[in-house]
Amino acid sequence: MTRYLVRRAALLVGTLLLASVVLFLLLRLLPGDPANALLSVGATPDQVAAARHQIGTDRPLPAQFGHWLSQLATLHFGDSFVSSLPVGPEIVSRLSVTVPLTLAAFVLAVVVAVPVGFLAAHRAHTWYGALAGLVSQLGIAVPAFWLGLLLVWVFALNLRVLPAGGFPPDGWSSFPDAFRALVLPVVTVAVVMAASLIRYVRSATLDVLGSDHLRTARALGSSFPGAMWRHGVRNAAVPVVSVLGIELATTFLGAVVIESVFALPGLGSMLVRGIAQHDYPVIQGVLFVSTLAVLVVGFLADIAQRLIDPRLRGGIAR
Amino acid sequence: MRRRVFLVTGIVLVALVLAVALVSLFWTPFPAADTTGGRLEGPGAHHLLGTDKLGRDLLTRLMIGARIAVAVGLGAVALGAVLGGLAGLLAGFANRWLDDTLAALLDILIAFPTLLLAMLVVAARGASLASAIVAIGLAMSAIVARLTRVLVKRVLAMDYVTAARTSGVSWPRIVTAHVLPNIWPTLAVNLALQFGLAVLAEASLSYLGLGPPPPNASWGRLLQEAQSTVLTAPTGAIAPGVLLVVLVVGVNLLADGLRDVADPTRRGHR
């Protein structure tokens, strides 16, 4: 296990480095000069050159890349081309919206999807199984932003029980307002996430329910809950955990759209602004943090799988 | 039997949207840029589904939106299938070193979600129908490539391929006679699912204002425009979403049904 941990951690660092190269190059392929963001229309060539020098885009690419990497190593993300404010602190303050949103939606989705998916498999041939299948089909096809819009219409505009969008300017210091602001976004994200989770839980449970060892355990006199607990849960959990990792990452990044539905000052809206303004440090910083989050979640999911399933611990570490 | 019902439902739903998209090429109730209607009219005899805040006919805009959704879905799937299929074949046939490199690269590309990649491409090329297709198709090709690679490797490990090689069959012939016939059913089902995801991705892009520009706006943009007037004119905020769900559910049911047709072992249980 220790050897695996070391190898897997090395892979994590390697992928992160490679991803940062890809990120950096991808951005430089974008046409459009970020210096323009600093200038008014009709700037003289001298002013353009000065602006480029100020933000450092006049230097050769390898030098720019080296500069960025050295900043990353000290956890600095540089200053915004547009506002000249450091990117790092803004990312941190915006994470205080995006992270609670993602985690709360994730927990809610798991709490709903696991029992629903299990029952859908256990009672596959009843109306309940059919209904659960139908609901999750629908849930997968519903665009998250539309669901958000409908929830706003019903709960914020008609019933007036929750805010339609926005976040208190002083953040979590005014906890009740911040909490209320996140209720609808969390529910929106959780519903979409739960819909696809239900399918995975259901099919993992179906596999386990059809397995020989479970039938044998039952034949030897175990009660159904007992047999499920000893022989079923672990086996069903392995594929579900790997999907959970992917879902968590997708949700974190899917927050881009949901944050703009609810006008939340999260990482997503920061990215949209960065792209519109060709603000490289902002885009790089946000995407780097997102990639880091995705990779760390994948890392944790892989380790969780090995803790659950001893068969994965020996063998080929991949 | 229940599966058959799903397949037929899927075909009907998809055919419905396809028909609307086709009709919109020849006829819409009003011209796309026509703003002669009253603002935010409710559904009525003149404007069947009412108008938006600029007085444009909602039914007309929905029909054009269907055309765009289908165009983006088909275009992105075609691009993703060709690019991803070729890359996957290459990786499947490549030697260990090249294969490992390609596989690692694909894993990284897939770690960037479709929407983020698409946003970068749109930022580079400007918002247009073509940008949306290219952006979503490129992101999709990584997913298709990874699947193709696995499928190709599985076929190549079969004894009948070894036998064919031993009896002197050329590689191109092995691709056409053994690899492609064995991998296309799985690939086709996956591409159908990808079509649905492409339509959803385009809707999200358009919602963020990064899709095809008006007056030929997609459903995502209609929803974004209707958001501020949802209290006075709810139809505009509901109809485009319903159509999106109809198309995506239809395609997903179709894919599920096709999977059962393509793979007899899946029939009966699921």
Image (tube, coloured by chain):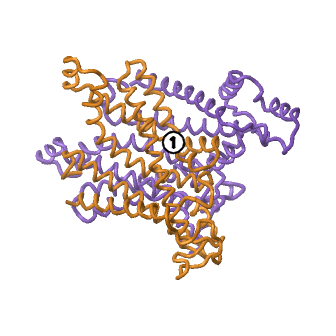
Chain colours: A purple, B orange
Q: Which of the pair A62/B68 is nearer the observer?
A: B68
Does dot 1 land on a helix, a strand or a loop? loop
Asked if residue B188 is positioned above or below residue B208 in the image, the reply reads above
Q: Chain of mark 1?
A: B
- Residue drawn where x is 55% and y is 26% of the image: A18
Instruction: Choose top left, top right, bottom left or bottom right for residue B161.
Output: top left
Coordinates of residue A80 in the picture (x, y in percent): 75, 39
Q: Residues within 10 Å of mark 1 (few under 14, many from 20)?
A: some
- Residue drawn where x is 54% and y is 38% of the image: A293
Q: Which of the pair A265/B92 is nearer the observer?
A: B92
Asked if residue A199 is positioned above or below residue B170 in the image, the reply reads below
Q: Is residue B37 left or right of residue A314?
A: right
Coordinates of residue B190 in the picture (x, y in percent): 36, 44
Coordinates of residue A122 in the picture (x, y in percent): 24, 55
Coordinates of residue A236 in the picture (x, y in percent): 30, 44
Q: Which of the pair A270/B43 is nearer the observer?
A: B43
- Residue drawn where x is 11% and y is 45% of the image: A220
Would you say residue B151 is visible in this rendering? yes
Label 1 amino acid?
Answer: Pro
Instruction: Choose top left, top right, bottom left or bottom right for residue B35.
Output: bottom right
Would you say residue A132 is visible in this rendering? no
> What residue is shown with label 1?
B113
Asked if residue A277 is positioned above or below residue B44 in the image, the reply reads above
